[in-house]
Structure formats: C-alpha cells, structure tokens
Amino acid sequence: MLKNEKNREVMALCFRLFGAEVINRDLGFYMLQGVVNTEAAKALTAIRHEIIKKVAANAVDILDCLNIPKHALYAPIAGDYVKYNSSPNYGEIVGSRL
C-alpha cells in the first residue's frame, strides 16, 4: 500500500483510466450483457477524457517512477510510418530526440 497520499491519488487515477479503457474497448459486450446502460455508455467518453487530463498532469512523474529513459519517449513511427516500416528496426529506437 502506498503511504504517500499524492502517490495514492495518482495510482488511483491510473487504475481508473485502465478500467475505463477496458470498458470502452469492450463496450458492446457490456451493453449486450446489460452491465452498462445507454446513459453510462454516453457518459464514458467524457469520463475517460477527464481522467486522461488528470493523469497527463502527472505524466512526467509517472514516467520517472517507472524509470523510463527520456530518449525512449520519441516515437519515430509517428513521423513517417511508411518509411519507418520499410525496413526492420528490431525494436530499436532510431533517431531518438526530445
């Protein structure tokens, strides 16, 4: 259990976001099973966006906590995906920058 209140709040937000994303991914199934009604489904996008904004405010701290190197944050595929996929990269980060 996290002893620091701020860390507990941030992790609770991450867990809520994960849960909202899982529900969103399988929303059709949950609606067919009667677990989620139409009103809740309509509200889900706004709820997800609200949680994302709160998590984004703590993104740098979360990445530091997970020990993710700064150079690994650059996504070269986002620039030109055709060029990026034209040769095998073997998971390597090519041309990384911040």
Image (cartoon, rainbow, N blue to C red):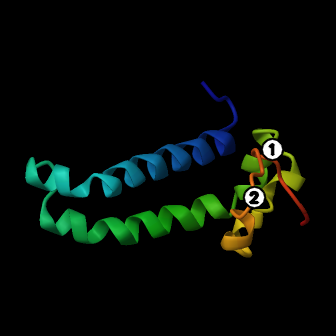
Residue pictured at 69% horizontal, 62% vertical: 85
- Callout 1–callout 2 Cβ contact below 8 Å: no
Element assignment for label 1: loop
Query: Which amino acid, mark 1?
Result: Ile
Q: Residues within 10 Å of mark 1 (few under 14, many from 20)?
A: few
Q: Is residue 78 left or right of residue 34?
A: right
Residue 73, given in percent of the width and then of the height, sits at: 79, 57
In the rendered image, which quarter contains the N terminus? top right
Q: Is residue 66 above or below residue 20?
A: above
The disc label shown at residue 89, or none:
none
Q: Residue 97, located in which quarter of the rendered image?
A: bottom right
Q: Nearer the viewer, residue 1 or 31?
A: 31
Q: Residue furthest front?
A: 87
Residue 98, given in percent of the width and then of the height, sits at: 89, 66
Residue pictured at 58% horizontal, 62% vertical: 54
Question: What residue sits right under mark 2 in the picture?
Answer: 87
Q: Is residue 85 above or below residue 66?
A: below
Residue 41, given in percent of the width and then of the height, sits at: 23, 65
Q: Is residue 1 above or below residue 39?
A: above
Question: What residue sits right under mark 1 in the picture?
Answer: 68
Q: Nearer the viewer, residue 98 or 85?
A: 85
Query: Which amino acid, mark 2?
Result: Ser
Indicate which label's residue lies in the foreground, 1 or 2: 2
Residue pictured at 37% horizontal, 48% vertical: 22
Residue pictured at 36% horizontal, 69% vertical: 45
